[in-house]
């Protein structure tokens, strides 16, 4: 083929050197990712440059993809419980209580759902025995109307005789409109201890 033998040898050595160097960089990327799991390829490139590794961000991105490494997104914690109020607090009635059928204990809570441009809030009421959602409501704010809507849905479809309603001490569950609906329907009111999410873990 009219090619010098030395040309092939030098090329092989060069390729081997590149492979070793790339493997070393990948090891560094893996180590940095373990220590800083929230680093994306841009921050990873900056860290490598601080460690005297000359490399561009496109190559770092390719290597991270080959390694299956992706920077984790730090999730903003969204508070759904506001217990700083002067409303009446009720005792916990469900601690160590055995549940044998539906409509004995309902647990209520609020969570949030991340959407493209923010959050929506979900108020849900679950039957402890069947684990069925008996009432729910979605809204853009944490106003008491959200929980009231979920409660009205639950009451409209279920028997409330000898029922205990359990929730946290959030203002949405201690407001007068919510408490009045519970009392008007003969529902016993139970609440978790302050700062104890395990009391309402079912919901």
Image (cartoon, helix red, strand yellow):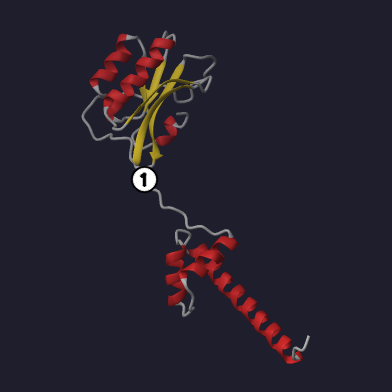
- The one nearer the camera, 129 or 68, is 68
The picture places residue 163, in percent across and down from the top left corner, at 42, 13
- The one nearer the camera, 46 or 162, is 46
The picture places residue 8, in percent across and down from the top left corner, at 73, 86
User: In this view of the protein, can residue 89 be seen by the observer?
Assistant: no
Please report the residue visible at 46 percent of the width from the left and 32 percent of the height from the top.
201
The picture places residue 120, in percent across and down from the top left corner, at 35, 34
Query: Which residue sits furthest left?
Result: 86
Image quarter where the C terminus lies is top left
Q: Rate crowding at label 1 as few (under 14), some (14 to 19) or many (20 or more) other CA atoms within 10 Å.
A: few
Please report the residue visible at 46 percent of the width from the left and 67 percent of the height from the top.
44
Please report the residue visible at 39 percent of the width from the left and 39 percent of the height from the top.
115
Name the side, left or right, on which 104 lies relative to 153.
right
- Quadrant in the rendering for residue 157: top left
Name the side, left or right, on which 162 lies relative to 4.
left
Count of all numbered marks drawn on residues in the image:
1
Name the side, left or right, on which 35 lies relative to 182.
right
Please report the residue visible at 52 percent of the width from the left and 69 percent of the height from the top.
59
Up-down: is 113 above or below 166?
Answer: below
Up-down: is 154 above or below 91?
Answer: above
Location of mark 1 (residue): 77
- The one nearer the camera, 79 or 99, is 79
Image quarter where the N terminus lies is bottom right
């Amino acid at each position: 083929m009219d090619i010098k033998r030395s040309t092939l040898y030098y090329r092989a050595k060069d390729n081997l050197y590149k492979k070793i160097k790339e493997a070393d960089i990948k090891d560094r990327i893996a180590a940095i990712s373990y220590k800083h799991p929230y680093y994306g390829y841009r921050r990873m490139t900056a860290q490598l440059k601080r460690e005297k590794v000359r490399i561009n961000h496109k190559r770092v991105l390719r290597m991270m993809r080959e390694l299956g490494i992706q920077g984790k997104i730090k999730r903003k914690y969204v508070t759904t419980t506001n217990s700083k109020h002067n409303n009446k607090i009720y005792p916990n009635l469900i601690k160590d209580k055995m549940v044998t059928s539906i409509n004995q204990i309902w647990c209520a809570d609020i969570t949030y759902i991340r959407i493209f441009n923010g959050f929506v809030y979900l108020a849900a009421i679950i039957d402890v025995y069947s684990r069925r959602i008996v009432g729910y409501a979605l809204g853009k704010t944490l106003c008491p109307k959200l929980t009231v809507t979920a409660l009205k849905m639950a009451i409209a479809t279920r028997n409330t005789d000898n029922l205990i309603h359990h929730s946290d001490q959030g203002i949405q569950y201690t407001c007068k409109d919510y408490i009045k609906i519970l009392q008007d329907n003969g529902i016993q009111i139970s609440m978790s201890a302050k700062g104890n999410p395990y009391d309402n873990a079912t919901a």
